[in-house]
Amino acid sequence: MVFKNIICPVCGGSCDDVQVNLDTKNRTIDVQNACKMGNAKFQEVVSSHRILKPTIRENGKVKDVSWEEALEMSADILVNARRPLFFLGSETSCEAQEVGLHIAEYLGAPADSNATICHGPTVMGIQESGMVGATAGQAKNRADMIVYWGVNALESMPRHMSKYGVFPRGYWTKRGRFDRTMVTVDPRVTPTAVASDMHLQLNPSSDYELLSAMFTILNGKEPHPSVEEITGIPISVMKQTVEMMKESNFVAIYVGLGVSSSYGKHRNIEIALNFVKEMNNYTKCNIGALRGHCNVAGFNQLASYLYGYPFGLDFMKGYPRYNPGETTTVDLLREKDVDAAFIMSADLVNHIPADCAKYLADIPMICLDIAPCPSTTAADVVLPGVIDAMECDGTFYRLDNVPVYFEPFTESPFSETKSNEDTLKQLFAKIKAKKEA
Amino acid sequence: MQALLNTGSTINEGRLAKGGNKYSEDYTKECAVCWMCAEDFTSLGCPEKVSVTSRDGKHTVAVRSKVTEAMRSGQVFIPRSIWANVVVEPDTFSTGSPRYKGAPVSVEPTDEEVLGAEEIVLTLYMGGE
Ligand code: SF4
């Protein structure tokens, strides 16, 4: 059967035009419009490696158990821990994340999500300076200059250029790519840089210096000549770039981890945001983060709305606290500041530095996921995941913080649960029963 | 050789990770790879495999080498994956995000075996359990 307008649950692009032909008899799925990454995830609906049974590790051996047993053991681990970490990953709905946040609040535990190892510093930069933002549609219809700064869009959000950024024909950009100038700032010659009209190949970790020199130029002053050696970019090129921006009608800047993960972190983002504000004295200019994980923006929105902080929340004192560097996942694990972990829809062991991953593997860990990965290998309890946007409905937030409601085209393969939200609700009920017993 | 480590996505890394194939040979071939320029590759003696070591010397990972014009001398790239993260520094500068970009590492030729993702978890993180 063919289903149209399916939302892709893979990256922050949340493409809403995917067409799926699911053949339940032969267990095949044909996917149109999605990119390579999106297509790979859609194949998970019929894949042979899908996790279909809960497992636990007992005396070093992994064995299949019933859902009931797996949930019981998970609840035991979380209730008996003094400080369990809740990592509510982004490859699931806001609805599931919300239940996870409530469990963390109930247990007085820290709760975090993928933003912490992704655009966390970007969010912190926004808290420092505020952001001139726009929806993807605004940029599509208006932007005649696109800047990809520290992001390899073609490989991290493969359809960004074709769907939102560079190629689509907009109301004021009727000729698509021909109406747009594309600039990439990256220390590497990435495929995105190759596709650009101009590539500023800066030295690694010199984003702050380059942005501040461009800020100086924008203010009509001459930057110090040493900036050429530090950044590897001639001042004349910086001036040309600033001039191109000023002469454009609408500049859309997309930042990636190249800015927020390099030396300088949130300060890089802060100066980029200030630069954008200043640029608005000359032309329309906005900035947005290219969010690699699906619904990573959703957790930020949800946690801010419910508890006032976007990530790295800690409920230990009975009220939410937020102190990046202390209450954030990598720091909690590095400092061995938690004694159990619940990881949902994110392969945390794969994505964190060795010291943190080793400690995470040492402590009791519950992992909810759909396919075997380093986190499920290291976990003590594995709960099978339901694939959002394919097997259940819910809400994602797109890269530009626009909420997208998605509907499934098939059902959860488990009679025990309808969605990850459902699984978490069952877990919460068990936790409450144990706590209040 | 001292170098600055950059990590990030590649399209096939994304395709294999999102498709649940992190334990496949293809994933190891795509991600357990250290990209460098021809000049650095030659100065290392054109090794097939290199070991990348974190600045504090605590963590080392063996990966295949790849020569590419995408890199400049003194800079190396490993696709975002468990191999890269073995040597990424855990300090977050009080932001929560480790240094995925620009961590200083040393790169040397090696004959060590390139481990698969599962072997890394089992041997490096779970102590051979
Ligand atoms: S760009 Fe992102 S959301 Fe769109 S199809 Fe590819 S993976 Fe899915």
Image: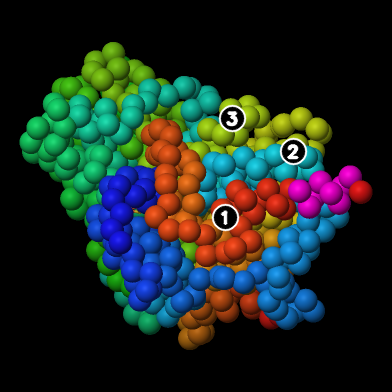
Q: Amino acid at mark 1?
A: Lys
- The reply to whether discs 1 and 2 touch (Cβ–Cβ < 8 Å) is no
Label 3 chain ID: A
Vertically, is B90 above or below B54? Answer: above
Q: Amino acid at mark 3?
A: Ser
Q: Which residues are magenta?
A: A429-436
> Can residue A56 be seen by looking at this rendering?
yes
Disc 1 vs disc 2: which is toward the camera? Answer: 1
Tell me which residue sits at (24%, 39%) in the image: A165
- Mark on residue A304? 3
Res. B8 visible in picture: no
Residue depicted at 79% across the width and 50% down the height: A431
Q: Looking at the rendered structure, which numbered label has been put on residue A105?
A: 2
Magenta-highlighted stretch: main secondary structure?
A: helix
Mark 1 residue crowding within 10 angstroms, few (<14) / some (14–19) / many (20+): some
Q: Chain of mark 2?
A: A
Report the Cα–Cα distance between label 1 and label 3: 27 Å
Q: Amino acid at mark 2?
A: Glu
In this view of the protein, which residue sits in the foreground, A436 or A414?
Answer: A414
Would you name the residue on which mark 1 appears?
A: A418
